[in-house]
Structures are given as structure tokens and as C-alpha cells.
């Protein structure tokens, strides 16, 4: 029975050879995300401000179907004009919901530790993405692993603080 539970929680990926295929998905990822989000909010990022050695921010998008605010914790990377985040969805074949939401409505809210601000989210284009992607995988090789297990090009999003 224990193996069956592990198989269901891991989405059948336990024991996979590809590291990107071992990342939590499904219900396990939902639980991890919910706990991370609550700890980050309650402590202003003191707990949850770093995950797996990577700095973490909270990204709030507007649901494209519901119009409700949706917040997710995401690792971020410095960018000359703000922050870069990766829509890896742990190598899932489809984009994460937060990415589809910001494509529909790019005005987002960002929280980095205790600082909250409005931002404009844009997907890095073919001219900008290669340089950003190279710097991201140099500090977080797991994203290269995720790219190996998904057929889609993993989007990189630049969050630029809204002015005005």
C-alpha cells in the first residue's frame, strides 16, 4: 500500500532517471506551494524568502477565467530592469496557470520579502531570452533538467516595477 501512495503523490515519477522528472507535481506541488505561500506571507518573507538556495518572491496575477487574485511563490533571478521568473511548472508539458494569467493580464503584484509593488510582466522574447536563460541555468541547473523533460520552450518572464 505504501508504494501505491508514493506512486500517486509523486505522479508516478519516483525512480525516474531524469532529475527533472522527479520534481513534485500534482497534489504534492499544490500542498508545498500552499504551505510556502502562507509562511512567506505570515513572516514577510523571513520564512520562505529562500527555497532550495534561491531567493523567492510572491507573484499575484488576476485569474483569466475567474478574475480572482492568485498568488504563487516563485524563485527569482536578478534582471537589469527588475526580476526574472521561470514558468517551468517543474517540467510539466503545459504552462503553469499563473503564466497564462499574466499573458492575459500582465499587470501583476510582486512581493519581495516585506516589499510589495505593482509590476508589468512580459515574456522574454527571442532576442532577450537566451542571455537570461543562460544566467538562470548557471545558478539553478534544475531548470535545464526541466527543459529536458518538457516538449515546450520554458518561458522566462521579466517583472518590471510599474512607474506612476
Image (cartoon, rainbow, N blue to C red):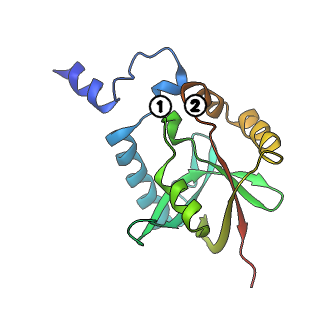
Residue 70 against residue 30 in the figure, above or below: below
106 left or right of 5 in image: right
The residue positioned 66% from the left and 70% from the top of the image is: 119
Q: Residue furthest left?
A: 1
Give the mark, 1 or 2, whose residue is nearer the N terminus: 1
Q: Is residue 45 visible?
A: no
Crowd class of label 2 (few under 14; some 14 to 19; many from 20; radius 10 Å):
many
The residue positioned 57% from the left and 41% from the top of the image is: 88
- Residue 36 picture location, percent across and down: 45, 53
- Counting labels gives 2
On residue 146, the disc is 2
Q: Is residue 164 visible?
A: yes
* Image quarter of the C terminus: bottom right
Frontmost of labels 1 and 2 is 2
- Judging depth in this view, the residue of 91 and 32 nearest the camera is 91
The residue positioned 79% from the left and 55% from the top of the image is: 79
Crowd class of label 1 (few under 14; some 14 to 19; many from 20; radius 10 Å):
many
Q: Quadrant of residue 63?
A: bottom left
Q: Secondary structure at mark 1?
A: loop
Residue 15 against residue 85 in the figure, above or below: above
- Judging depth in this view, the residue of 54 and 78 nearest the camera is 78
Q: Secondary structure at mark 2?
A: helix
Q: CA distance from mark 1 to mark 2?
A: 9 Å
- Residue 70 picture location, percent across and down: 44, 64
Residue 38 against residue 114 in the figure, above or below: above
- Judging depth in this view, the residue of 104 and 4 nearest the camera is 104
The residue where tag 1 is placed is 23
Q: Quadrant of residue 122?
A: bottom right
Labels 1 & 2 near each other (Cβ < 8 A): yes
* Image quarter of the N terminus: top left
Amino acid at each position: 500500500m505504501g508504494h501505491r501512495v508514493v506512486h500517486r503523490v509523486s505522479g508516478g515519477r519516483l525512480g525516474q532517471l531524469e532529475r527533472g522528472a522527479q520534481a513534485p507535481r500534482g497534489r504534492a506541488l499544490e500542498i508545498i506551494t500552499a504551505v510556502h505561500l502562507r509562511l512567506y506571507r505570515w513572516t514577510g518573507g523571513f520564512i520562505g524568502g529562500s527555497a532550495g538556495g534561491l531567493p523567492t518572491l510572491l507573484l499575484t496575477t488576476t485569474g483569466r477565467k475567474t478574475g480572482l487574485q492568485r498568488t504563487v511563490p516563485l524563485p527569482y533571478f536578478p534582471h537589469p530592469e527588475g526580476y526574472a521568473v521561470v514558468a517551468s511548472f517543474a517540467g510539466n508539458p503545459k504552462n503553469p496557470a499563473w503564466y497564462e494569467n499574466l499573458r492575459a493580464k500582465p499587470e501583476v503584484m510582486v512581493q519581495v520579502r516585506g516589499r510589495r509593488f505593482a509590476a508589468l510582466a512580459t515574456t522574454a522574447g527571442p532576442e532577450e531570452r537566451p542571455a537570461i536563460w543562460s544566467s538562470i541555468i548557471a545558478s539553478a541547473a534544475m531548470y535545464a533538467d526541466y527543459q529536458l523533460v518538457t516538449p515546450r520552450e520554458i518561458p522566462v518572464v521579466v517583472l518590471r516595477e510599474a512607474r506612476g
